[in-house]
Image (tube, helix red, strand yellow):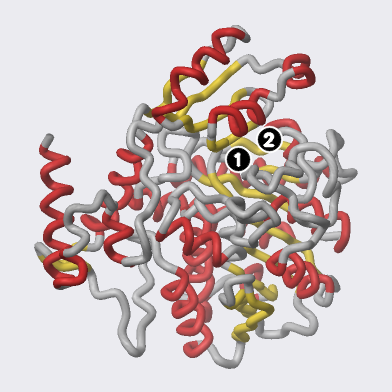
Amino acid sequence: MAMRIGLELLSLAMLLAMGTAAMRSLNSSVPLEGIEYGNGIPERFDETQLWRIYNITEAMQQSIPVAQVMEQKFGGNIWKENSKFLDISIAKEHVKAARSFLDAHRLEAQVLTDNVQALIDEEQLDGINNTQSEPGFRTKKASRNSSGMHWKDYHDLETIYAFMREIRAKFPTICRLYTIGQTVEGRDLKVLRISENPREYKKVWIDGGIHAREWISPATVTFILYQLMHNWENQPAHIRGLTWYIMPVMNPDGYEYSRTVNRLWRKNRSPSRRANCFGVDLNRNFDIGWNGYGSSTNPCSDTYRGTSAASEQETKVVAEFLSKRKYNLEAYLTYHSYGQMVVYPWAYKAVKVRDADVLQHVANTAVDRIAQKTGTSYRASVTHEVLGVAGGGSDDWSRAALGVKYVYTIELRDRGTYGFVLPPKFIKDTALEGWTVAETVAQAIV
């Protein structure tokens, strides 16, 4: 009850601060994020349950694709699907029917949370509390000379891009900021290069935010950028002796949509031939096993792979940018959530790469270092063994098309308690874990 009263008072305080236009929204059922942006009425998830379903056998999947049925028949939102379990959220109005379906097939669902909206509200309130400088006032977001970047809360796209511009301005001789293309909604796709010798040094690519709702991913990638640059002059040779390409948000349209309209949005925002269905899963759109297992031909599905390989602007421009720079490209690190894993190819087929022993060793080292630094347990493995087979991924594409050696997908925190809706109080330690992987890979290269 105290939490509810606190949220109501906080909503009122924010509305009063925003003036009469916001006051007109006082009686509307909108969360804090929607009030702040004033961008329509965000989708709410009151009494939406998050389930974990175990014991879905391969034989059952052949006859009844459980995740697909739950998504299409009961409006389920797939959070995570692998060889051991399926995490899926079910709206209140579909819970009874979905339960009956599981019962009919002798499947049980563990309820991870009975109210997804409560997780979203907690995430927002935690960010507000963390950035409170004085009672009733948020920490100043930005100034003319500062992006306002910090890791106490999640940031919008403009703050992230302002941070990239800030780094470029502070280190003009070693940084170059690229705009490599635009999204379907006209947002820039930005990449920052850091190098003292870009012609000769070996290269590392780092990206985040390919899936919109995985907010901890861009937060981690911006933290990695900070870790690289805040003490650049004193960085060891294995850091300074590389060329770094950093892309914190590969899916700007989806990211902003997840911040203003639908917190659980995954895809980009490309329109489709179906009027009510938008978006392509960019991590099913790369030209590797594109029309294979693990993606959907249904434009309404969260794993819709698009009309063709690299059909999406985001996928296309990243592929073109990297293809022109494949010489000396030694590492491809892509940050996702959730699951606490460091995994490597292949994902599009149930086979390991030839040098899997080398990749496993580096991943094991990173996992051990994470445990020492934060006490958090990660798992190192080949992708298909822990996440299942899925084609069209950027990681597999970088190995197959460009011959990159150190290819890793890092699934950040947690393991399902909060899932995508990780409270900001966990950002710093999670980002440190992401940095630990990058640093370990850099040591392996040089």
Between residue 97 and residue 354, name the one nearer to us: 97
Q: Quadrant of the C terminus?
A: bottom right
- Compared to residue 262, the image places residue 70 above or below, namely above
SS for dot 2 = helix
Indicate the position of residue 369 as horizontal and vertical percent values: 55, 46
- Compared to residue 138, the image places residue 10 above or below, namely above
Near mark 1 (Cα within 10 A), the count class, few <14, some 14-19 or many ≥20, is many
- Compared to residue 100, the image places residue 79 above or below, namely below
- Compared to residue 274, the image places residue 188 above or below, namely below
**Mark sitting earlier along the chain (2/1):** 1
Q: Residue at x 18, y 53 (%)?
A: 27
Q: Are marks 2 and 1 in contact (CB under 8 Å)?
A: yes
Which quadrant of the structure image shows residue 55? top right
Q: Nearer the viewer, mark 2 or mark 1?
A: 2
Indicate the position of residue 434 as horizontal and vertical percent values: 54, 54
Indicate the position of residue 120 as horizontal and vertical percent values: 35, 45
Q: Residue at x 66, y 68 (%)?
A: 238
* Residue furthest bottom as drawn: 173
Indicate the position of residue 280 as horizontal and vertical percent values: 67, 54
Between residue 263 and residue 300, name the one nearer to us: 300
SS for dot 1 = strand
Between residue 253 and residue 359, name the one nearer to us: 253
In the image, taking residue 58 as reference, residue 354 lies left or right, namely: right
Tell me the residue that label 1 is attached to.
341
Residue type at mark 1?
Met
Tell me the residue that label 2 is attached to.
387
Residue type at mark 2?
Leu
